Amino acid sequence: MSERQNNSTLVLLGVNHNTAPVDIRERLAIPAGRLADATRSLAHAPGIREGLILSTCNRVELITMQDSAGEAETPADLLRFLHEYFAVAPATIQPHLYEFREREAVRHLFRVASSLDSMVVGEPQILGQVKESYTVAREVGAIGGVKAGGAGYLDSLLQRAFTVAKKVRSETQIGSSSVSIASVAVDLARKIFGSLANKTVLLVGAGKMSELAVRHLVQHGAASILVANRTQARAEAIVAQLKAPGLTAEVIGFEELYEQAPRADIVITSTGAPQQLFGRSHGQHFISRRRGRPMFFIDIAVPRDVDPRLNEVDGCFVYDIDDLQQVAQANLADRSREAEQAESIITEEVARFQERLQTLDAVPAIKALQVQAEQVRQAELARAAKTLAGLTPAQREAVEGLTRALTNKLLHPQLVALRKPTDS
Amino acid sequence: MSLFWLRVAVLLYGIAALAVLPAALFDRRRWNLVAIPCTVAALFFHFVSLAETMNEAHHRLPVDTHETLSLLGLLLALAFLATYARYRTMSLGVFLLPIVFLLGLLPAFRPGEEIVSGNVHTGWVFLHIALLLAAYVALVVSLLASLLYLIEERRLKAKSLGAGGFRLPPLETLDKIALRSLLFGLPCMTAGLLIGSFLAQIAYGAAYFSDPKILLAFAMWLAYVAMIYIRRMNGLRGRRAVYLSSFVFLVILAVWASNQFSNVHRFTTP
């Protein structure tokens, strides 16, 4: 861990989905292509030693190490940076800003990296986004650069944040359950089939959500897609969109639907038809044709395309849009419970990080004290040199040892006090 | 010394049986690092103990009830490790490890005093016993997998998967475990019965085959084959698969119990 610069303060200033509406966030959002330039500008702002910008669709945060001398003006400086860089009036953004310093800033960053501050708690993207910001800041020299004296406090902080985020993920179940409809559908399919490799998906009808679910299933290994639509051209368009290497996608005629359906392990329906497409007897027929192999029906249509009684057929599993939503809600509740455990990990880690910093902060003082004590000891030995001249080498070594031990013992309480963390 | 190793093994099985609960039911994977090494170590000490016991008694096969139970426990623990290695699932351990622990308790703390009759000192008899026990273990594993299938199927149908429910392997994995363990058990049972019949033919002649225990054993084999045929042909899963496996399991229990009423197949003294 690098040594922290003296007379500097960690300040975090930002807006997020809780404090600012989207029209404010979008004005402050920095596209990936401009992040390096923005970070460089931040690092060159007056009073900033190190800086990093985290910009996602839900937050924009400036994390900085600043000269403590101008502490009173610190928020104004960052606000001025936001105003100048984004051309947004300070009065517009000020009501939505939050600011954290030192320990609270460390806590906030750990919470952000661990996805505890995300709109969907436990979502995995945020850690990648923090890492991306860190990489950019390093590349432009905004972290651990010349202004930071080559020793980056933010570098240590970010590295620690990554470790904490990893720990939260491995020691809690915060990210283990799905909370979007499409990913819940994939999860359920995996609970039935295990791996989705070599599985066939039948898409009946068209709709944004059903296509999204199909894409998710393909991403997780589904190997073959059948598309049935009353409009042949629409089915062909969907197949064309879905085409990917290693994926078989074919159009089947709507009149062949019941003949072809038993080929599918997963059926996604969203037709908008007024009457149900699949009834209980269809399920029995399909399962018999499949020699008992299960079938999973995902009914996204309203009104529903699949008779709920089909779920009673052995081997058939039917989930409509409400069922999927319910599972997503339950998973979200699970995540909230896990978040409590994650918060206590964060608290522990913040304390550990601060303690470590405290020790590192004391290193120069400890070194100085040790040097001074050694100089005094050497001076006293030199003064007594004449008196000690008649000593044998063994006796001289004993005196040397004695003075060193005395010095160390006298220094010990001061060194312990210096290393001891304080609440501040 | 063999008793000491067995007690060590039982203690380790006990630890593994506890550790498997958070690992399998709540997906706390760190507990795998306790359950699996403990089971491996227990299996090793169990094997050492069994080998020493049989060596000290100057025979090479489990001849009393305690030794047989001990060997059965060892095979069940092996089955748990095999399913873990192949399918990465700890769920079967929730049932198997406590059974193994209990099967080990009796021989570890109340060792058998039965004596062996003189005509069983052959490697063929050991093979006969080990193969039949392996077939029983395969059926137990299959029955457990079918039961877990039923539980997971009901949960999926009831849509009650969220809110901290227990985590079970996917249905397809459970189905594979159930069917493949049966397919593993069939040759074991067939070979075990053939070896037993061959040895009986030499020792007792045709009279052996009119014994109720022996007739039940062949009925068990037929039920086993019928079960595999029905499962494979009809793709039987869930509730019906559990009924079928339970029926064959009851037949096996009856065969085991009939040992006490047999006139010819009694190698342990009362």
Image (tube, coloured by chain):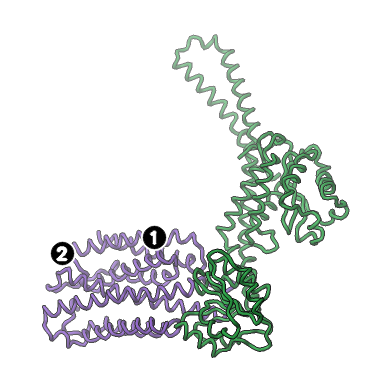
Chain colours: A green, B purple
Chain of the residue where label 2 is placed in the rendered structure:
B
Q: Nearer the viewer, residue A49 or B187?
A: B187
Q: Amino acid at mark 1?
A: Cys
Q: CA distance from mark 1 to mark 2?
A: 30 Å
| Disc 2 crowd, CA 10 A, few/some/many (<14, 14-19, 20+) | few
Observer able to see residue A170: yes
Chain of the residue where label 1 is placed in the rendered structure:
B
Labelled disc at residue A377: none
Q: A244 left or right of B101?
A: right
> Residue sitting at 75 percent across and 53 percent down?
A60
Identify the secondary structure beneath mark 1: helix
Instruction: Find residue B143 and report its horizontal and vertical position in percent.
Output: 39, 78
Instruction: Find residue A200 and report its horizontal and vertical position in percent.
Output: 53, 74
A284 relative to A216, above or below: below
Q: Amino acid at mark 2?
A: His
Instruction: Find residue B74 and report its horizontal and vertical position in percent.
Output: 31, 67
Instruction: Find residue B211 and report its horizontal and vertical position in percent.
Output: 18, 87
> Residue sitting at 55 percent across and 66 percent down?
A220
- Determine which residue is flagged by label 2: B58
A287 relative to A192, above or below: below
| Disc 1 crowd, CA 10 A, few/some/many (<14, 14-19, 20+) | many
Q: B176 left or right of A72?
A: left
A423 relative to A401, above or below: below
- Determine which residue is flagged by label 1: B38
A222 relative to B207, above or below: above
> Residue sitting at 73 percent across and 43 percent down?
A51
Residue A178 falls in which quadrant of the image? bottom right
Residue B210 falls in which quadrant of the image? bottom left
